[in-house]
Image (cartoon, coloured by chain):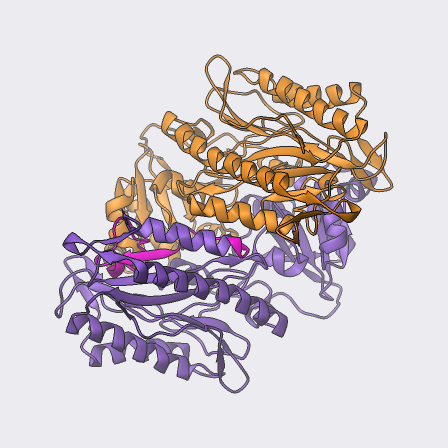
Chain colours: A purple, B orange
Amino acid sequence: MARCISLQIMLASSPSRPPAHQNKPSSMSTGLLIYENGPYWLYKAGLHTSDASLLLVDAKGATHLMASPIELSEFRTKSIAQHIYTYTDAKKWIEKNDLKFSLINLVKFLMAKAKVNKLEIPLNFPARLFQFMQENKIDVTVTTRDPFFEEMAYLRADEIKKLQEAQNLATSSIELARSLIAAAEVRSKNMLYLGGQPLTSERVQGEMNAYAAGLGALEFHGGPIVSCGLAAATPHDNGHGPLYANETIVVDCFPRHKNYYWGDCTRTCIKGKASPWQSKLIDTTIAVQEALCAMIKPGASGDLIQKTATEMFDKAGFPTGEKKGENYGFTHSVGHHIGLDMRGPGARTLTVGGGPVKAGHALTVEPGLYYPVNINGGIGGCRIEDIVVATKTGHKNLTNLAKTPYLIP
Amino acid sequence: MARCISLQIMLASSPSRPPAHQNKPSSMSTGLLIYENGPYWLYKAGLHTSDASLLLVDAKGATHLMASPIELSEFRTKSIAQHIYTYTDAKKWIEKNDLKFSLINLVKFLMAKAKVNKLEIPLNFPARLFQFMQENKIDVTVTTRDPFFEEMAYLRADEIKKLQEAQNLATSSIELARSLIAAAEVRSKNMLYLGGQPLTSERVQGEMNAYAAGLGALEFHGGPIVSCGLAAATPHDNGHGPLYANETIVVDCFPRHKNYYWGDCTRTCIKGKASPWQSKLIDTTIAVQEALCAMIKPGASGDLIQKTATEMFDKAGFPTGEKKGENYGFTHSVGHHIGLDMRGPGARTLTVGGGPVKAGHALTVEPGLYYPVNINGGIGGCRIEDIVVATKTGHKNLTNLAKTPYLIP
């Protein structure tokens, strides 16, 4: 799924301070504190929780977490955390210290257990709890690191296997969409019909999600995108209404696997006939996408990869710009990190000003072209997307799905 | 889905300050600022966005938002916001004011456009941006209100209709689960089989999600729960492995509809024969659930409803307590608000110390009993859950699904 050169990147890349966390015990020992039920939680606790909770990683890397009473037995059997505390444990300590049972005192309890007297918190830590900590004179620093747990940017072999499973969900859902489009017949005004009913974006989306859910998808992030014609010329338009022959159809699928990792794959097709402009649009995007994948290896400059994409598109006759308030051409970043977070870890890699690729990075490579206004002979859009993992010497593409033929009879 | 008397409630209910937002223009005019792509965003922008973005509600209630370039045309056609700004708009203002393009200067741009010189931010606002605002001497208050937009706690008629659609997704998925269990045969060791294969929690979950996704479900929040026997005795255990006859099976389904509202329904059944203890467990839970539903009306005390549940269970011979570190009995709150947020708006209503029910509240009513240890003659669990909306004079139950017969032949 395409990503704008976005506000999140600005959140992470603003004026920085030296990281406070050091992996050595000292008289000032720093712990990393989260309060969420999101990707950081999944990474360090190893299981899903329904409500946000507190988790602290101590100076030696051990995880201390607060389990809610109604989830306690699951934590005891499934969590990978080293230390699991209950409200009963906390209440004993809180009473002994003559305090009240409150969120800030649960933080103090965890700090005591983890033997830390300084805290570092992530960018997205809740402002209210941050404010409580300031008011309670807790020595707390908002991190400059994104992801908060640095190792999350580098996928282990077991994580790559999970990412592969998630990507297989995405690619098999796209194959299903292609088979529905192939089975459709073209009726008047080029509208597609299947089983006597119009084949709409919504119908294909429902079938794709039903199929992925049956295989264990947990979430679809509002997608997939099945967009046609003018809608395909807007990167994040999900598409709606009937699909048509002789128009570009972008199919972008990004389901979350029950293993909690995200898949992300895009293919573009045309039912019927392609105009010369449409053929060139898709051929060019595929060629650029493959050239960019080939650049992925440790040390490759994310900034250069992004610039290469725009240059290649320009040279091929597909310029980027703005006309009457509409952006056209290659309007987003080449790709984003992917793993337990759909758009993260947030490390700024495949975008303008992006840093180097490193071994273990899992990245989407997804150049696209969008012409909502007729600039050079057509209206429509195309995006081609794979997930690739940077290896020690190059990369491995996790996407087992052909890019051609894109013309569906 | 059951909710612990949880940390989120503590986040919202800690020491408070007077709300800063007043709906009158003055020389100090306050705006409400969010930076997210969650429930508040959906409520005020009226459409899903993939990346977090900024949105400011001015003193007159008008919404000002930053649209990313790749989503701009969707915002222009689908957003309900009164003012939509582009990066180009912001860059002009930022350059004119001799500033740099940064997240904090986008905030300043929105403040200028919305004519506010003070900001209020929600509990979960990102700590990093809050810190930038403090460093930039922006007059900012973390709210004490939960939800941030107070009117979100009171559902309008059009929202109740969407919630009804979402609840229909949940109930029809549970009906599917029941039909699979009904079609199963009991083999050796009471294990259920369907189509020659064991009928497992995972298989029923996959079928339920496939069915809901085909009808437009977007997300499953890690669920549904299909838990049997000992797993059913842990409120948030999703269940795993084979299902068995003569054991309690809890089926809790909480899908998100494509209209972005959440459904939430639980039923408990037994395939085969029920022991007297199991029958009494389920009969009691149904009776208590119906008594609690009958209490829902404006002015009813959430605290009293919670206490009534525990008392009724106690009197019926189902005590609540702790044994060898295992919680048993009625271990969670009666219910939670539901709408655009699965567990929100966060207003503390159906729980210990909970405030009064008000007209327009949409609440789950979901008492449950859990015996992971043999306390009074059995091991297992039961939960019965509906969504009810408080009306001016009483309530309306949105859940069109029978609670009996729970014994499946």
Can you tell which quarter of the image residue B45 is in? top left
- Taking depth in this image into account, of B315 and A11 the one nearest to the observer is B315
Q: Measured from the top left, where is residue B342 in percent x and y?
A: 52, 39
Q: From what the image shows, is residue B399 above or below residue A317?
A: above
Q: Measured from the top left, where is residue B404 in percent x and y?
A: 63, 25
Is residue A234 magenta-colored?
yes
Instruction: Look at the image and tell me whether residue B222 can be seen.
Output: no
| Residue displayed at 13% across by 67% down | A375
- Taking depth in this image into account, of A364 and A117 the one nearest to the observer is A364
- Taking depth in this image into account, of B40 and A30 the one nearest to the observer is B40
- Taking depth in this image into account, of B138 and A218 the one nearest to the observer is A218
Is residue B67 magenta-colored?
no
Where's the N terminus of chain B, which quadrant? top right
* B5 left or right, relative to A171: right
**How many marks do you count on the picture?**
0
* A246 left or right, relative to A65: left
Q: From what the image shows, is residue B128 above or below residue B328?
A: below
What segment is highlighted magenta in the picture?
A214-243
Where's the C terminus of chain B, which quadrant? top right
Q: Measured from the top left, where is residue B56 in percent x and y?
A: 36, 42
Instruction: Look at the image and tell me whether residue A184 can be seen.
Output: yes
| Residue displayed at 41% across by 73% down | A354
**Residue found farthest to the top:** B393
**Residue found farthest to the bottom:** A393
Q: Measured from the top left, where is residue A163 in percent x and y?
A: 54, 67
Q: From what the image shows, is residue B285 above or below residue B52?
A: above
| Residue displayed at 51% across by 14% down | B394
